Image (cartoon, grey):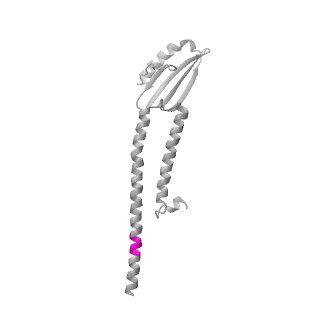
Amino acid sequence: MSLLLEIPPFGSFVDFWFLIGLSTGTVLAIIVVLSVIFSRGMKRGITVTINERLLDGLASKKDHFLSNLEIELQRRGMIARKPLEQGYDLIYRDFFNEARIYSSPEGPNLRYGYRISATNQAIALGIILLIPFIIGAAVVVFLALLRHNNIRQGLQEAGDTSAITCRTQT
């Protein structure tokens, strides 16, 4: 039974919605697995980007680099703060993202990097907005099945009545 061949007569209408539910569940499972793998738990949200650069000859100018970086970020409308935790030099947060910025000297060079993660609030909002979709999809499937059964029953009864009428009239 091919799904595409059976949709018009409602033969696999349930299979179609089952496929949508299965794919939605699979995507959610992949998101959770990737978030655990790349974010080292859900405390930091889902890590979206990790980027690093090696800046030639700036190891001795780390503090000057960070102050210039903070000024450049402010020019772009991003106000970075000093983080409370160790391992990061600056942190920028908005509702959807959190960027943790770090730099460390490596020989004569300076390693500059950042990790951008989706915030827990954005993830929670996405899940909350997904719940009505899932409930709505379940209601639509239930109503479609109910209507499908009513139509099928009506067609069978009309066919039986028509057959009886034909037999009695001849």
Q: What residue sits 52% from the left and 62% below the top?
A: 5
Instruction: Please tell me whether residue 135 is drawn above or below residue 49 in the rendered image.
Output: below
Q: From the viewer's perspective, is 7 left or right of 132?
A: right
Q: Position of residue 156 (x, y in %)?
A: 42, 72
Q: Residue furthest top?
A: 60
Q: Position of residue 1 (x, y in %)?
A: 55, 62
Q: What residue sits 54% from the left and 19% below the top?
A: 103
Q: Is residue 143 magenta?
A: no
Quadrant of residue 70 within the rendered picture: top left
Instruction: Please tell me whether residue 37 is drawn above or below residue 8 in the rendered image.
Output: above
Q: Main secondary structure of the magenta part?
A: helix
> Is 97 or 69 nearer to us in this picture?
97
- Counting the numbered discs, the total is 0
Question: Which contiguous range is marked in magenta?
Answer: 154-159
Which quarter of the rendering shows the C terminus?
bottom left
Instruction: Please tell me whether residue 142 is drawn above or below residue 57 in the rendered image.
Output: below
> Is 55 or 48 nearer to us in this picture?
48
Q: Position of residue 140 (x, y in %)?
A: 40, 55
Q: Position of residue 44 (x, y in %)?
A: 48, 29
Quadrant of residue 57 within the rendered picture: top right
Q: What residue sits 39% from the left and 62% below the top?
A: 147
Q: Is residue 158 magenta?
A: yes
Q: What residue sits 51% from the left and 27% below the top?
A: 115
